[in-house]
Image (cartoon, rainbow, N blue to C red):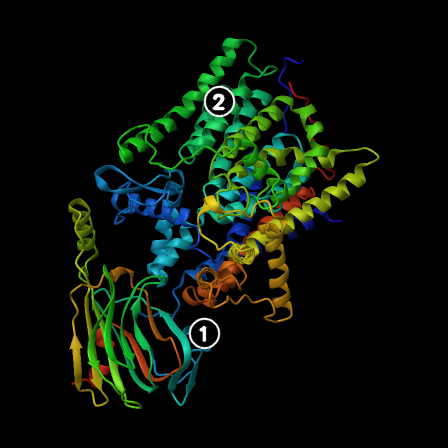
Amino acid sequence: MNRPLVRSAVIALIFTCVGVATAAAVFAYFPDPGSAPSIFDDFKWNTTANGFWHVNAIGASADIKNSILTLSGHDIELDRRLQTDPNETVVVAKVRGLHFHKFGLGIGVYHAGTVGIEFDDDGIKCGRGSDYGWQINYLKAWNTPPVGQWFYLLVSVKNPYPNPDDLRKAELIADAKNTKLKPITLTCSVYDAQGNLISRVVPKTPPPNGHYVSFDEVFLRTWDSPNEYQVDWFYAGPPSGNPGNAIFK
Amino acid sequence: MSTSHPTYPSLAPSRIRALTLLVAVFAFFFAAYTFTQSGDIFSTGDTTIRIQIAENILGRLSWDLHGWHLQFPHHLKKEFLDPRVSKCSQGRTCSTYLLGQPLAIIPFDKLGSALAVHLRWPYGVTVAWFARLVGPLFGALEVALFFVFAMRLGYGLRRSLLLTAVFGFATSVWPDEQSVLEHTEVAFFLLLAFYLAFRYREQHRNWPYLIYSGAALGGAAITRYQDAFLGAVALGIYLILPRGPDRTLLQRARSVVLFGIGLLPFVAVDLWYNWIRFGSVFATGHYETLFGEPITTGAAGLLVSPGKGLLWYCPVIFLLVFAGPRFYRRYPMFSLASLAVFAGFVLLYANVTFWHGDPTWGPRYLYPTIPFFTLPLGEILGIRTRYSHGIWAISALVVAASFTIQFSAVSVSQWRTWYKVIQYEGRQGHPWEWIAARYRYFWDPHESPLYFQLHGLYQMTYDTLLQSNKYEIVPPDENPTLDGVTTDFAINQWNFWWASNEFDWWMGERKIMLGMTALVSIMLAAGVYLTAEAAGGFAREPARSPEVPIPEAA
């Protein structure tokens, strides 16, 4: 056997492997083009099947047909990771219920708490995790849910410390004086199909205890019993990119 | 006994080759261990606390757990309290854990936080996953050091590489580093301390090696001081035992003092850390009853119980029957010191009420002793008798069985096994409670985690190959504990991070593929190099020079 040839072949193979590893690491370092600071889905594509949404269903289904997302059945959750805007992030969707029970959308922390809006058989509620557990404020209550009627649901969260230096200083002060950081400002709004504001709440007592910097996912979900809800479009990101800006009055 | 200094086994003909070998072994195992990392990054609460300590140090140079307020109702029994956290000075909450692992986590935490922002990944989960790379890091360091030790013992390159592969994949080192508990870090520092002392005592290195050895044990002392204490006792015995380079009692005492000088700064760090957290250099924050288990029960549980016995979790120990006597003849004093380490760990932890360390895989407190009973196994390939082939065949079977056990532990979620244990206990009329003092599965072979884990491997393989859901676990509606296990942990998925549904979501399929490609390529590059070296592909002469003769112990 030609020893130098074998040695050269081995070295070439090693360098090829190192090259492939380096190339893979470099490509992995580029951020995904699909992870823009905002997300918008008008359900023109099968985004529950292609991985855009992470779907966790228990006795339920998420079907996309004619640019409408239909959530039907028992429990289903659609998540999408999101990089929040430094100042304010809104989550908006055009939604209707064909069979009401429990539906919600909002923004949250991976494996932890959320803030959101609930579109249920007893009304529309603004919800948030607090130091006293899950709290809600009614935006609108009803005895007979408006089956088939479109609404725009909007959740907005404002960062109390848009400057990271301010947050760091506030943390040091809170640490030293054993006080709390300023809470986020949560606003929930509901508009009718023509874009007229029906109701808005800014719940403060007790304040939400979610930290803005930790928000990293938005979600849509149903739970508890047979539901049938439809979503025409969904947006999450800075308020400037909200498609509802052209509609809301 | 010769007074001249003979030539001792070296790693390679040149320093650059030795360094390349070392880097290749480390790179191979770091990539392999990272490749097989668990997708379950939230289940080890101990690691999560250590990550919190690291982030408090990194973010605010603070030793307490920011934002934690311990409030236990007065009527609560001690067994319900969490021994991992305790009230510390100024009414704050501190962890009872030491600094070692949190300090090692800091660079990974920093890297994860930077990449999370750059790649727009969810911050918390990204940081948690990167921080957990401290497990593969110390696993790979331990294995690389083991390889060096094997070479210095005179096994030669091929035998050392084979033994290192056995150590890395067919002992509990693999599931231990995957757990990201601190035992791997302790094991590395303990082995390093012994390696340096071995070089001083058996291979006539200079006295600074004793200081280095003490400092290496210091790494263990700031990670788990009780393990470092046991290591110090065994190392002290090793240095005092006769037939070493120190002829007189005074010389031996000098060696122990030099070793102590290396260790001292780390003991001081431990005492200072106690003081800054709990106001006294001797306060550890522990309030629970630590000792009291009958020593025979604890030792039997740690060594031979069907549910927790080291012999069954790491069956390569059985091969000491073949290798032990030969190794003892070559290195009698090192063998005795190894035995002292092992006996120390068994005797101490057998007396601890929490000897099982549950919920976890196997007798984790004994894992730092694994290198000491694996190193002698290199003797087996040197056996040249008429029974050699039979011994090698038996050894291969035992290694294969041990590998299968370790592979099942890393590839299938261990929470799947806990589900089965809880289910079994429930059927026996014992409703489950997550209170370690009440676990009772250790002595019933029918509910041994080994059995459930291996069965889980079969079930997952069956469902994957046949694309069925025959063995998918669905909890009964009326059992909230079982329901909790299935919803909190992905027990119906393979345990590797790249097979996890959740990683697919936040990391993205493309990034996962690129990560896997990079890791496999590193394994291939390192593997090809090591194979070529073992085959003599880089030797200068056409024919391989004979291996350096194995020296008899001094």
Rendered location of residue B421, percent (x, y): 54, 54
Rendered location of residue B158, percent (x, y): 68, 40
Residue type for callout 2: Leu
- The extreme right residue here reads B386
Give the structural element (helix, strand or loop) at label 1: strand
Q: In the figure, is residue B521 to the left or right of A167?
A: right
In the foreground, A152 or A11: A152
Q: Is residue B171 above or below residue A144?
A: above
Examine the image and state in which quarter residue B93 appears: top left
Mark 1 Cα shell of 10 Å, populated few (<14), some (14-19), many (≥20): few
Examine the image and state in which quarter residue B201 appears: top right
Give the number of the mark in front: 1 or 2: 1
In the foreground, B328 or B29: B328
Q: In the figure, is residue A21 to the left or right of A191?
A: right
Placement of the C terminus of chain B among the 4 image quadrants: top right
Rendered location of residue B462, percent (x, y): 64, 65
Mark 2 Cα shell of 10 Å, populated few (<14), some (14-19), many (≥20): many
Name the disc covering residue A58, or none: 1
Q: Is residue A217 above or below residue A64?
A: above
Q: In the figure, is residue B73 to the left or right of B112?
A: left
Q: CA distance from mark 1 to mark 2?
A: 62 Å
Q: Are marks 1 and 2 on the same chain?
A: no
Q: Which residue is mark 2?
A: B210
Would residue B27 be visible to someone looking at this image? no
Give the structural element (helix, strand or loop) at label 2: helix
Placement of the N terminus of chain B among the 4 image quadrants: top right
In the foreground, B79 or B519: B79
Residue type for callout 1: Ile
Q: Is residue A184 above or below residue A244?
A: above
Would residue B112 be visible to someone looking at this image? yes
User: Chain under label 1?
Assistant: A
Rendered location of residue B143, percent (x, y): 56, 41
